[in-house]
Each structure stands twice: as structure tokens, then as C-alpha cells.
Image (tube, rainbow, N blue to C red):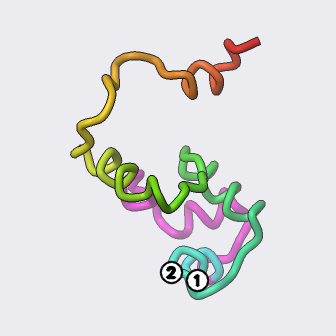
Amino acid sequence: MREYRRMSLAEVGRLLGMAVPNVSAILLGKKDSRASTLEALASSLNAEWVLVPNEHLAEVRQVLAGKGGGADRTARGAVDIFLAGEHE
């Protein structure tokens, strides 16, 4: 995601208030982090950190790779409506 956003480790570190070696270690899976750190990392990359149930992981990966053949992606789903706050 960082490379997709064309952000350097230094930029991500600055946004997180973390040293570059720590950011690198987290992204490489060499350092454990708290959920709040992962949330901040995702936010700095204009992304969202989500948990995907294992039974749906393959399908989610296909969708992310642009190979999903699931539902119409132009139609707003219940999750989109909920996240937009229009469910109230």
C-alpha cells in the first residue's frame, strides 16, 4: 500500500511520529504493534485496517486483485451505506 501511494518510509514515519526503522520493522512483520498503531498506519496511507474472516479471505484477495466476479460493484451495498452513516 505504501508503494501504491508512492510514499517513502520517512513520509509514513513523519505522519505516525515514528522513526523510520520502526515503521520498516512493522511493515516487514518483524515487530509486533498495537491495534492503535496499525490503525494509525492505515490512516496515514489513506486506507482502512480490517479483519477478514479466513473463510472469505480468498474471495477478498480476488476482489482486491481486480479479479472478483461477485456482485455489481457500481451498486452501493449495505456496508457502503452503513459506513456513509446513512443507516440512521
Q: Which residue is mark 2?
A: 28
Q: At x 67% / y 62%, what residue is drawn?
A: 38
What range of the chain is rendered magenta?
1-21
- Secondary-structure class at tag 2: loop
Contact, CB < 8 Å: mark 1 with mark 2?
A: yes
Q: Is residue 80 left or right of residue 58?
A: right
Residue 74 point in image, percent of width and height:
34, 19
Query: Where 74 falls versus 41 (above or below)?
Result: above
Q: At x 26% / y 42%, what residue is drawn?
A: 68
Magenta-colored stretch includes residue 77: no
- Secondary-structure class at tag 1: helix
Q: Residues within 10 Å of mark 1 (few under 14, many from 20)?
A: few
* Along the line of sight, the residue nearer the viewer: 2 or 55: 55
Q: Which residue is mark 1?
A: 25
Q: At x 77% / y 12%, what residue is drawn?
A: 88
Q: CA distance from mark 1 to mark 2?
A: 5 Å
* Along the line of sight, the residue nearer the viewer: 43 or 15: 43
Residue 58 point in image, percent of width and height:
36, 58
The dot on residue 54 is none
The N terminus lies in quadrant:
bottom left
* Along the line of sight, the residue nearer the viewer: 71 or 13: 71
Amino acid on which the number 1 mark rests in the picture: Ala
